[in-house]
Image (spheres, rainbow, N blue to C red):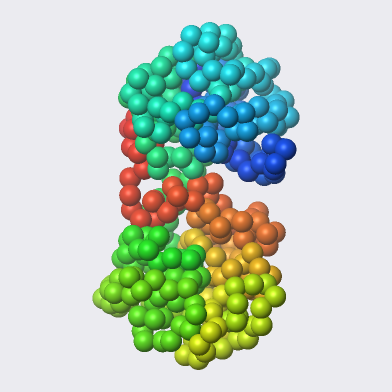
Amino acid sequence: MAKKTIRDVEWAGKRALVRVDFNVPQDDSGAITDDTRIRAALPTIRYLIEHGAGVVLMSHLGRPKGKVNPKYSMRPVVERLFELLPEASEVKKTEAITGPAAEAAAGSVGPGQVLMLENTRFDPREEKNDPEMAAELAKLGDVFVNDAFGAAHRANASTEGVAHHLMGVAGLLLEKELAFIGGALEDPARPFVTIIGGAKISDKIGVIDNLLGKVNALLIGGGMANTFLLAMGKNMGDSLIEPESVEVARGLIAKAEAAGARLILPVDAVIADAFSASANTKTVSVDAVPAGWRILDIGPETAKIYAAEVRGAKTVIWNGPMGVFEMEPFAKGTFAVATAMADASALGAITIIGGGDSVAAIEQAGLADKMSHVSTGGGASLELLEGKVLPGVAALADK
């Protein structure tokens, strides 16, 4: 990684202004239902405390649309952080984000202490990457640390703008994300296999296009496979398709052939007569989808083929489910891939879950700890897979 990290800074007596991604799911009472993202930032916070820094944290939470909304306050996050971080001599919160109150609160943070600013998106300037807000944030620390991989693809005042006023370095989580995903794309152990699923081909055209020049095999599942199958002349019944993407799909099939990459599509499918967990279902060849029925999962034969490809790989990246895995009758394909990923890990492969729904699936399958790396950022990992430069990374200091 060509960017400086927190290991390149002498922290004693300094204040670290750290952008974390504490955008965690909550229930109606405001209680945090999954603290994975908070835990993912702990190694960076611990490193800073151990090396004598005071720590000022900033994050967004939810979509308050530039207005103060108590529903999206960082208070529950601070309470959880206090439980998870006994090493900190104190974990404090301020209602402020910038300005005199924030500066006074940050100024009082000594070595080993942690301060959490209020939700950065309570300020309408955050998502506009307002230079004035960025300059105000920069007054709260001596060095900027970006550890928010999940927000690194957004050029906001707290992710990109602030690095124009303070030296910016990567935190340990951001470093790890870039090392795993970037490393897999730049110099993968082969065979290199990627599995791309999800509903729409249009969301992932750039990803598929970029990967076709790099992978040995690309496995397509989920709703997007239907558009590829339609492009090959198959009748998709009532399945989800994107007519406007059929030509794109044909182009990608041709590109795969030219690049010598195997683009593998489902050979059978689980179909239903309605989009419902209680619908009638059957397994058919992709050549035999009747009118009035829709594909909602890859079939057992396809699952077997995909699992074999994954188990034979040395590097595997998975982004997007194989079917509507939230409904039990259509979850088998996704879970078959999850199991194959765990098997590949056990055989020594590097296995990477590229954020989003795949993370939910791998956690539901109870296999998250069997993967080499589970990404904390769906949108950011997709942009990396697409070959894009993330603004929150580009703004950091070069080594």
Please tell me which residue is depicted at 60% across the width and 80% down the height of the picture.
272
Answer yes or no: is residue 69 visible: yes
Residue 119 position in % (x across, y down): 54, 28
Note whether 205 is above or below 268 in the view shown: above
Judging depth in this view, the residue of 13 and 151 nearest the camera is 151
Note whether 125 is above or below 203 in the view shown: above
Judging depth in this view, the residue of 60 and 153 nearest the camera is 60
Answer yes or no: is residue 6 visible: no
Note whether 159 is above or below 210 in the view shown: above
In this figure, what is the number of numbered marks? 0
> Is 37 on the left-hand or right-hand side of 134?
right
> Is 234 on the left-hand or right-hand side of 51?
left
Judging depth in this view, the residue of 318 and 30 nearest the camera is 30
Please tell me which residue is depicted at 52% across the width and 38% down the height of the picture.
63
Please tell me which residue is depicted at 43% across the width and 14% down the height of the picture.
139
Residue 37 falls in which quadrant of the image? top right
Quadrant location, the N terminus = top left
Residue 82 position in % (x across, y down): 70, 26
> Is 149 on the left-hand or right-hand side of 277?
left
